[in-house]
Image: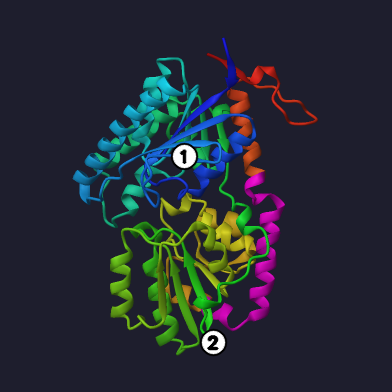
């Protein structure tokens, strides 16, 4: 009989690895703590089906093309569920695993972990986003109909069946407990946090700057729920209402709303004022942010965004940048006085906040310093990784050497 580290199988549906930096950071933290990690995810920026990222095994299934509406939900989630289930059996037979760690959305993926619980495996439910609220936010005016109720059902089922639960903030943890009936003792908060690339001195990418102009930037996914159209409309206000031409907008990233966003920029006569970079290698994201004078988190306040700890805001903060946000609950908790806030999803107020920062370089500098202090005082990924390892050590009754933080013999699983 051979002993080996406890083995974690991670399931991810809505992005690939290493594109999803939170999943990659969690996997690396577990590897560093002595666990073994395998990830199943769709193809994305990397199309290689079998891969290794350091010590992490990765198996990718072909990503399904996007189809809108209820039919699109059924096809995408049904296909991903079957693909993940089949690959999970392959991983079980080839490498084995002791726990299934489900990253959401969708909560439907919890069905795979619930099945393997019947075979004695543990289930860790990692709540990145609230799927029911995300569904409503992706198309304004959606009603709480059949799809919404189904999403609520699978969310509740996964929360109740999981052995341990992860939330990125207090809002999500409260949902797990109050709405879904999870045991508070099983619910851990592991916040998002910028990785080490954002914590050192980074040279700005000069090619995206325009002489004589302030660079106003956004980095992240471009979906309807992300509100990047609010940024474009606000920059239109800056140009027309405030009569300013001394700026350049930079939008870094891509997503399902990118085509509509480019059309909106052209319609508002901003095509020459906004640079769309498209997808870029993750390693170059810090140099883009370092070139920004003002950073934008334009996610509007709603039931979904109020529950989100946005990683882009924390990356801005790590690089000492001031941010303009709408007054969402978690943005305020994260950024504090390192951001200027606009109320009531009001675009003119958002534009006013941008102009305020444009006109006050001393304020930009002081807010940037405050932002980095908040990161260093508890919001780095290193601070969060401690909670993740605590969860898994608790799950498997692992005892670590208090001096060297090394797992004892109790760490081993037996096959």
| Left or right of 376 in this view: 70 | left
- The image quadrant that residue 291 belongs to is bottom right
Residue occupied by mark 2: 211
Q: Residue drawn 33% across and 32% down?
A: 153
Q: Residue drawn 65% across and 62% down?
A: 371
The disc, 2 or 1, on the residue closer to the chain's N-terminal end is 1
- Residue 169 visible here: no
Q: Is residue 397 above or below residue 234?
A: above
- Residue 29 visible here: yes
Question: Are dots 2 and 1 in contact, CB under 8 Å?
Answer: no
Q: Residue drawn 40% across and 29% down?
A: 158
Residue 69 is marked as none
Q: Is residue 366 magenta?
A: yes
| Left or right of 16 in this view: 26 | right
| Left or right of 406 in this view: 159 | left
Residue occupied by mark 1: 127
Stretch in magenta = 354-382
Which quarter of the image is occupied by the N terminus?
top right
Q: Is residue 152 magenta?
A: no
Q: Position of residue 303 (x, y in %)?
A: 41, 51
Q: Position of residue 51 (x, y in %)?
A: 44, 40
Q: Position of residue 216 (x, y in %)?
A: 50, 75
């Amino acid at each position: 009989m051979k002993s080996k580290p406890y083995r974690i199988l991670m399931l991810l549906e809505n992005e690939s690895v290493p594109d999803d930096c939170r999943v990659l950071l969690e996997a690396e933290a577990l590897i560093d703590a002595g666990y073994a990690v395998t990830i199943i995810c769709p193809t994305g920026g990397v199309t290689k089906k079998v891969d290794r990222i350091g010590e992490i095994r990765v198996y990718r299934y072909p990503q399904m093309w996007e189809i809108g509406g209820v039919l699109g939900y059924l096809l995408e989630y049904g296909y991903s569920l079957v693909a993940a289930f089949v690959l999970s059996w392959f991983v079980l037979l080839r490498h084995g695993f002791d726990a299934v760690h489900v990253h959401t959305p969708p909560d439907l993926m919890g069905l795979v972990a619930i099945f393997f619980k019947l075979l004695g495996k543990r289930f860790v439910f990692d709540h990145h986003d609230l799927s029911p609220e995300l569904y409503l936010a992706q198309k304004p005016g959606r009603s709480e109909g059949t799809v919404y109720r189904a999403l609520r059902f699978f969310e509740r089922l996964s929360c109740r069946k999981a052995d341990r639960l992860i939330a990125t903030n207090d809002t999500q943890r409260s949902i797990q407990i109050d709405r879904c009936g999870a045991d508070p003792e099983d619910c851990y908060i592991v916040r998002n946090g910028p990785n080490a690339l954002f914590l050192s001195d980074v040279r700005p990418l000069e090619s995206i700057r325009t002489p004589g102009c302030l660079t106003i930037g956004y980095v992240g996914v471009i979906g309807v729920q992300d509100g990047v159209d609010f940024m474009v409309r606000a920059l239109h206000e800056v140009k027309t209402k405030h009569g300013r031409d001394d700026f350049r907008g930079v939008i870094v990233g891509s997503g399902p709303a990118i085509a509509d966003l480019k059309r909106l920029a052209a319609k508002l006569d901003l095509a020459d004022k906004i640079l769309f970079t498209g997808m870029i290698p993750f390693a170059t994201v810090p140099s883009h942010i370092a070139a920004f004078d003002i950073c934008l988190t334009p996610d509007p306040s709603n039931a979904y965004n109020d529950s989100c700890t946005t990683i882009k805001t924390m990356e801005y903060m790590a690089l000492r940048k001031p941010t303009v946000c709408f007054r969402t609950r978690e943005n305020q908790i994260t950024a504090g006085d390192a951001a200027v806030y606009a109320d009531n999803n009001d675009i003119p107020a958002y534009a006013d906040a941008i102009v305020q920062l444009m006109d006050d370089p001393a304020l930009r500098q002081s807010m940037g310093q405050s932002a980095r202090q908040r990161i260093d005082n508890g919001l780095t990924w290193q601070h969060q990784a401690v909670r993740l390892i605590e969860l898994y050590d608790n799950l498997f009754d692992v005892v670590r050497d208090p001096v060297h933080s090394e797992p004892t013999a109790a760490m081993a699983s037996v096959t």
